[in-house]
Amino acid sequence: MFKHQLVIAFLVGLLTTLGGCSTLPTPHVTKYVFPKTDVYVEAKPTRKFKILGSVRARVNFNSMNPEREEKDLCQNYYNKAVADLLKRAKRDAHADAVAEVRSVVFFLDGTNKLYVTPECSDDGGEGQVLVQGLAIQWEKENKKPD
């Protein structure tokens, strides 16, 4: 009888151990699209405008995704950050657009650098993209009567 109890205990332990081993689910990545209008990264707006102030946005994301390259994840969440930047500029500053959009990277020595390309920081588990730009408002054109 003692022998059967040992065998059953061994089998239960084995099944519990094997049942507990599983792979981690792959994180779901929502695809974000760069806003095509009202955002100016390198080009200057052709219309006259006034600067309302600076706006910033930040997006944190799970960078532990074995199916996606780090560069692709950074680009995707940069798109989201820029879309959030435009929404914030319109909501908070009542802006019409955002100009001079830049990625911001902070270094360990306390300095930072601005980039016109998507740049993200990654601590191995969580990535982050920081963006900033200038909230602008279009100036009304005064038409002179002929």
Image (cartoon, rainbow, N blue to C red):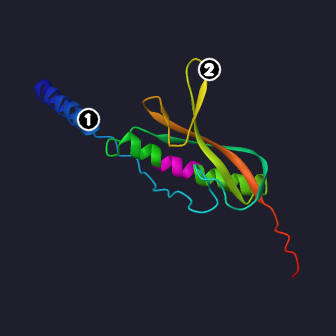
Question: Is 125 placed left or right of 142 in the picture?
Answer: left
Q: Earlier in the sequence, mark 1 or mark 2?
A: 1
On the image, numbered disc 1 is attached to which residue? Answer: 16
Q: Amino acid at mark 2?
A: Gly
C-beta proximity under 8 Å, tags 1 and 2:
no
Mark 1 secondary-structure assignment: helix
24 vs 53, nearest the viewer: 53
> Which quadrant: the C terminus?
bottom right
> Which quadrant: the N terminus?
top left
On the image, numbered disc 2 is attached to which residue? Answer: 110
78 vs 12, nearest the viewer: 78
Q: Up-down: is 74 above or below 43?
A: above
> Which span is picked out in magenta?
76-81
86 vs 2, nearest the viewer: 86
Mark 2 secondary-structure assignment: loop
Q: Up-down: is 34 above or below 110?
A: below
Image x and y of residue 10, in percent: 17, 28
Secondary structure predominantly adopted by residues drawn in magenta: helix
Q: Residue furthest top?
A: 109
Mark 2 nearby-residue class (10 Å; few <14, some 14–19, many ≥20): few
Image x and y of residue 21, in percent: 26, 36
Question: Is 98 placed left or right of 7 in the picture?
Answer: right
Image x and y of residue 13, in percent: 23, 30
Q: Amino acid at mark 1?
A: Thr
